[in-house]
Image: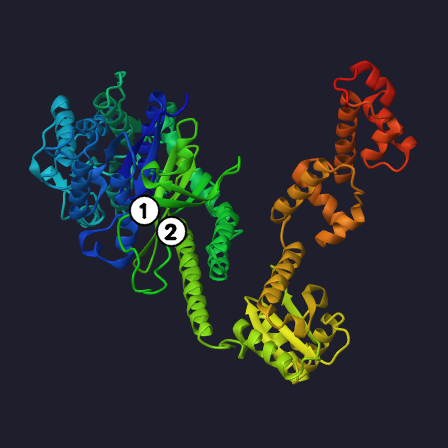
Amino acid sequence: MDAKGRIAVILPQVSSNTETGFIDTIHREACRYGYDTIVITGAINYVDQHLEGTYSKGQRNIYDLILQGDFDGFIYEANLFCSVTQRELLLDILREKDRPCVTVNYEQPYFPSVSADERLPLYLSARHLIKEHGCRKLYCIGGNKGHKPSEERIEGFRRAMDEAGLEYDESCIFYGDYWRDIPHRIALDIAEGRLERPDGIVCGSDIMAVELCRTLLDNGVRVPEDIKITGCDGSVISQSERVTITTVAGQERINGVLAVNKLMELMGEKTDSSDMQPELIIGESCGCGAEKGKAVNESLSDIREYTGTIFELLEHRKTNSHGEIIRRMSECKDIYDVIGVFMGCCYMIPTGIRAELCLCEDWCRDMNDPSVFRTKELPDRMILGIEACPEGGDKMKEFMTRDVFPSLKKRHEPRLTVVTSLHYKGQIFGYVGFTYRKAVHIVLDEFYMSWCDAVSSGLNTVQNRMYKDYVNKRIESLSEFAPVLGIYNKRGLISKLMNMIAENSNSVLNLTLLSYVREDRVRYSVPPINTIVNAIRLSDPQAVLASVGEDMIAVVKQGETAAGDPSEKVVQAVTESYRGAVEIKRDRIVFHTERVSAVDIFSIEKLISGMEDRLKGRMISFGSGTFSYRDSFTSLRDEIFRHPEKEWNIEQITRSIGLSKSHFHRIYKELFDTNCKDDIISSRMEKAKWLLENTSLSVSQISEQCGYSNNSHFIRQFSSRMGMTPSAYRKRNGQKKQIK
């Protein structure tokens, strides 16, 4: 089924199997109705006192996508947010958006709220201890006093006790705030005799049950022999203890089903009723262990799968570190470098099947006033930096923020995507989205956060470089010297050349533009071009040096009859100047030389620009990959098919492009899935067929017009390709058009 719309799920974080279970249920149900599931999360669950921190604001900026994005409906898990302020802010945003919305476990007057029956979990666990283990004296540790879901869970405990006819009073019920402190104190009181020892204790969360169990065991009280314990929620921690916890799971999945069904009703969809019940997961803390097959159910399988994902990621991270992406991002020179590193480091988030880097259209600071930058919200338009996916995606493409991702506009099956913010020191860069096959694969841990922060740091690095270049160019525009290298800039070079020619109109100058192609895996303590400038300056004080572009210098020499190949002299000068401490490889030096005389005095700027273009072409030919050649190779192929009669010579072609034969053939094959020689023959055959069908030219004339100097060779090649001679081909196809 193709997706017909999208719903957003708003969460503070995704850091446990209960949260992924909630998302998984929503995604599976949404798929049935044909909707994408977009999880919008700040990835960190902030408390109120940390809400105004710079980093917090950057993370929480992602919630602006609620307003900017085009969503058909929202599911808001408000109860999970630790910050009451954040909870209310999001409620205000959703009211402003005015789209169908369902909240989970959060009663408010604006949207319908759904909640699983919170009375069932502790009812099931208490009944299990009473019926299966004969417990008669039970304690219950609930959550927050006055909190509706917590009170309902305690009500379930009361119901089980009442049905069994067991006596209890309020001294048997405690409020533990769903955390460790109070269960820890209760366990100590029991162990030290200040509190009467019960047969069993029913806890309102797994965290409380785990802490209770640990403290009792550490203080000489056996679990389950002396006291039997149960938890609630079915979190991973319940199954990772020395004594596994008997718990009740499935509430989040029930909430997911209820939320989707309610949202679909609001959106006008016909819904199916569903009757899900929480499941008892049998652990060792009640004394059952894995007896009678009770431990095998869907909820326990989910816990094990999530645990497996975590351990798989830990194994994966033994062979890589987010330090690698930090290092590579710190070396980025431009936005294309950032995109390349982003794509090259997606393997570090192995559970994602698609990654999309989306930048605000104003992601780069104002060069005239770098203090001006985006600190909140998202613009109406974004830039897709890159879409990394198996089928290949777009890059550097503008799109409307309301589309969330350009890929969602294309035909696709319902998708599960998590969106988090990209920011750095208060500046909002945009957001990143990872698509997953299953919700259990979503792990937004510290590694993930550091990975995203590294991307933002790379963007900041590029931004700073751009500003530095901008300032240098402004300085250079008012000067004739390059401030970094201490030599002439392009403007100064033009002025110097004109003066040198004016002083001696008969002189001929040798102007060489030179650059050094860096090796990808080599780290240079000093930029190679700086090394070359210093070496030439020391070895030849008479040479005129100028910086004409990034990593490109000009060398002017007077009085030499021929410039020759300067690379050997450059290497020699570097070796002598640095005494072998710095290595410059001759085969990585690219250059272009022209002779300048009096006739060029008024066209020097044009001459230098032409030389720059030719040198850049050589640098691309030397250092770039296949796709850098696409335009030049496509033009060549078009020319071959337009003019098959030309004398196409592979050696001349490779020489003109500046590639070796083997490199040329490899790129041609990679781009067009054929070789150049076959294309030359095919183009000639196509022209020959047309001439045979539409003219009365003789075979020898056609042979000549198709670029063959030997008529017999043409006939053999035609017969081999077409399975018949040219004359037979003409006879079979007939003359379609006579030349008058």
Quadrant assignment, res 541: bottom right
Left/right of residue 467 with respect to residue 52 in the rendered view: right
Depth check, front residue: 528 or 724: 724
Disc 1 target residue? 43
Q: Quadrant of the C terminus?
A: top right
- Disc 2 is placed on an element classified as helix
Number of numbered labels in the structure image: 2
Quarter of the image containing the N terminus? top left
Q: Gap in Å between the C-alphas at discs 1 and 2?
A: 8 Å
Picture layout, residue 523 above or below residue 422 = below
Residue 237, percent from left and from top: 33, 41
Mark 1 neighbour density, 10 Å: few (under 14) some (14–19) many (20 or more)? many
Return the mark for residue 449. 2
Q: Relative to 136, say whether 238 is above or below.
A: below
Q: Kindly identify the amino acid type of the residue bearing the numbered disc 1.
A: Ala
Question: In this rendering, does residue 177 appear at all?
Answer: no
Q: Residue at x 50, y 55 (%)?
A: 337
Seen at 53% across and 79% down, the residue is 486
The extreme right residue here reads: 712
Type of amino acid under label 2: Met
